[in-house]
Structures are given as C-alpha cells and as structure tokens.
Amino acid sequence: MVRLASPTPSTEAGGAKARILDAVVAIAHATGLRKLAMDEIAREAHVGRATLYKHFSGRDALVKAAVRAELDKFFRELEGTVRRYDDQDERIVHSFAHAYRLLDEHPALAPILRLNPDLLLPYVVTPSSSALNRGTEFITSFLDDGYLSPRQATRFAEHTARQFHTLTLISETDLGLRDPGGAEQYARDFLLPVLHRLHLDDAL
C-alpha cells in the first residue's frame, strides 16, 4: 500500500507572494543567486519594497522560502508519478527517473550549480538538510507496507536520497543518465538490487 504524505498547500496562485518567489527563480535562472538583490526581486515581481518586506524579512529568508516552494512543487509532481504504478519496483524506477529529469532541467538549478554552488550547501549537505530529509521521508512513504522492516526502509530511503543528491549536484557522469531511458536503467541497475538485498536480509 502506498502511504504518501499529504502535499504541502501551494502558494495562492497570482498572489504577490507567489510572484515574488517566481521572481527569485527567474533571476537565479539568469544570473545565479550571488548578486540577488531585494530591489531587483521587487522589480521582477512587480511589487513595491513594502510588499516585499511584508512577506520576507530579508534576502536569506526569501531564498529559503523559494527553495521550500520549489521543493513543494517537486514533491507534488513526483506524487503524481508514484500514484501511477501499483508495482513497488516500477514506482521506484519511474519516480527516480522523473525526479532526476525534473532537477536536471530545472530552470534555476543549473545556473546556480555553475555560478555559485556553495549557496546550495545549507539545503543539501548539512545535518539538517531539508532536501535530503524530505527526500528520505518521501521515498519511505511509497514503499510497500511490510516489504522492509522500518529500519531497512529508512536505510534504503536515505541511501537512495543521498545517491540522488550526488547525481544531481555533480551532474557530469559516464553513467548515461541523460540517455533515452538512462535514468530508468540506473535505477534498475543500482537501486533495485539494494532494495531486494535488504528484503532478503530481513528474511534471514
């Protein structure tokens, strides 16, 4: 049985806050985040400074909110993929592949990785990494009940989330992930064997 967590409510469409967050992504796509300025965001979002500061206390708070909003969109999109597959192996293969392509083609991520990747460190490589923690929880949520013990399910989910982070942040690879069907084949070759082995270990 698939146990997906309830999606985080989306930002109200067309509202000033949504336009501000969209502006951050648009600017990051064009120039990265190093020189991101509040005045530039206000102009891009077509809001006044007072409105901008009403929603966000400063640049750091705004970047964090934009990352959270993009993660919300990312996981909502993945939930749709997960729900299409009854078979656990197929859920893992296709959700991994879809997730990889979503981030590989994300309009803001590539410029940030190229221009100032250090700005992503607080979100992906710290003990409180929101992206890693949410990824681990998400993967755990769609494993079949009882297929793995809770301990093994957590281990598999964290392993998969960490692999995903590495492949996304260091995108140049000879693993063929960008080939047609490449991401699916990676999941079949390197993720499913781990899942099945942990299942066997539980049975011993």
Image: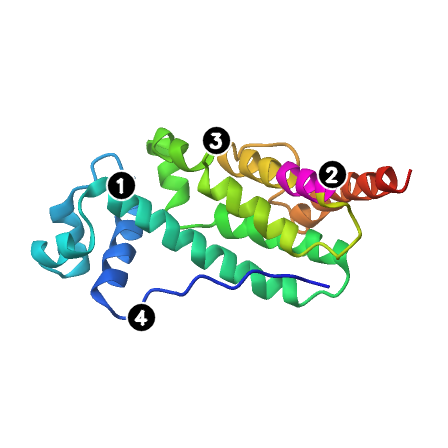
Q: Circle 3 — which element? A: loop
Q: Measuring 75% from the left and 57% from the top, which residue is drawn there?
A: 145
Amino acid type of the residue tagged 1 in the rendering? Thr
Left or right: 77 in relation to 92: left
Amino acid type of the residue tagged 4 in the rendering? Ala
Q: Residues within 10 Å of mark 4 (few under 14, many from 20)?
A: few
For mark 3, what is the residue? Answer: 127
Label 3 – label 1 distance at C-alpha: 28 Å
Q: Residues within 10 Å of mark 3 (few under 14, many from 20)?
A: few
Q: Measuring 91% from the left and 37% from the top, which residue is drawn there?
A: 204
Q: Nearer the viewer, mark 4 or mark 1?
A: 4
- Whether residue 201 is situated above or below residue 55 in the rendered picture: above
- Whether residue 190 is situated above or below residue 87 in the rendered picture: above
Label 3 – label 4 distance at C-alpha: 33 Å
Q: Circle 2 — which element? A: helix
- Whether residue 121 is situated above or below residue 138 in the rendered picture: above
Q: Quadrant of residue 166?
A: top right
For mark 4, what is the residue? Answer: 13
Q: Circle 4 — which element? A: loop
Q: Residue 31 — which label?
A: 1
Badge 3 vs badge 4, beta-carbon distance below 8 Å = no
For mark 2, what is the residue? Answer: 190
x, y percentage for residue 20? 23, 57
Label 4 – label 1 distance at C-alpha: 25 Å
Q: Earlier in the sequence, mark 1 or mark 2?
A: 1
Q: 14 or 198: nearer the eye?
A: 198
